[in-house]
Image: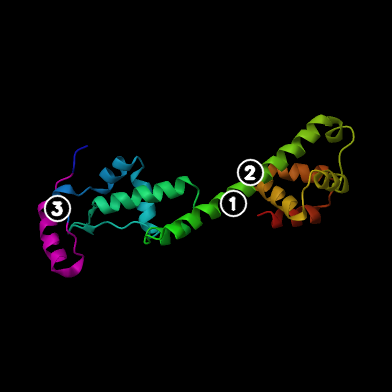
Amino acid sequence: MAIASAPPAMNAKRANINNGVNHHSESTTTMLSVTQLATACGVSRTTVLYYERQGLLQPAYRSDNGYRWYGAKQQQQLQAILAYRGFGISTKEIAPLLHTCDADQQEQALQRQFQRLETEVLQLRQQQRAIMMLLKRPQSLTAAPVDKAGWVAIMQDLGFSEHDMQQWHRRFEQMAPEDHLRFLQSLQLDEHQIKQIRDHSR
């Protein structure tokens, strides 16, 4: 991959940086533009700028014409950000991890994310069981629709708590709001009850 060489204006800017404005020790000939950094890390230019807006990644410095330039340190930071995001860790949680060498803190963040994923997997399995039960009893969705009490009883038989059912409705509303609405109507709920459930699911 070609490495961008610094324009003349950048050399002047570097002189100011070396005077204490934003000192760095890397040669300008090894610096990458935002597009080159994105390409090197396999992401889009928009992604790099997004992480800058989130306060996770800043250029090593900017030239007089406003161009961003990144060094090896910033490339490593971006790779770390992408790794954490690949684990599903939020940008808010990533910020402190980028500025610590504390292995325990990093491990705790990964453990928290692992527990969240475990919870999500459990909820998905519960939803699968609910769907499988209905598939085995197709008449319950056609000739003899299940009312609210019947549906709650089914979910409780599958091990759903009140919180689990709320989460189920929340996911349903987020993924397929129109289907969720039709489902609630099939439970013979009045408009006020339907609105209340949907409002709590958003």
Circle 1 crowding by C-alpha within 10 Å: few under 14, some 14–19, many from 20: few
Q: Where does the image place residue 28, in percent across and percent down from the top left?
A: 15, 52
**Residue 121 has which mark?**
2
Q: Where does the image place residue 49, in percent across and percent down from the top left?
A: 35, 52
- In magenta stretch: residue 19: yes
Mark 1 or mark 3: whose residue is earlier in sequence: 3
Element type at mark 2: helix
Q: Residue 81 vs residue 35: left or right?
A: right
* Viewer-side label of 2, 1: 1
Q: CA distance from mark 2 to mark 1?
A: 10 Å
* Residue type, label 3: Ser
**Residue 31 has which mark?**
none
Q: CA distance from mark 1 to mark 3?
A: 44 Å
Mark 3 or mark 2: whose residue is earlier in sequence: 3
Element type at mark 1: helix
Q: Which residues are magenta?
A: 4-25
* Residue type, label 1: Gln
Circle 3 crowding by C-alpha within 10 Å: few under 14, some 14–19, many from 20: few
Q: Quadrant of the C terminus?
A: bottom right
Residue labelled with disc 1: 115
- In magenta stretch: residue 14: yes
Q: Quadrant of the N terminus?
A: top left
Q: Residue at x 14, y 65 (%)?
A: 18
Residue labelled with disc 3: 27
Q: Nearer the viewer, residue 118 or 24?
A: 118
Give the main secondary structure, helix, strand or loop, of the magenta stretch.
helix
Q: Residue 124 vs residue 64: left or right?
A: right
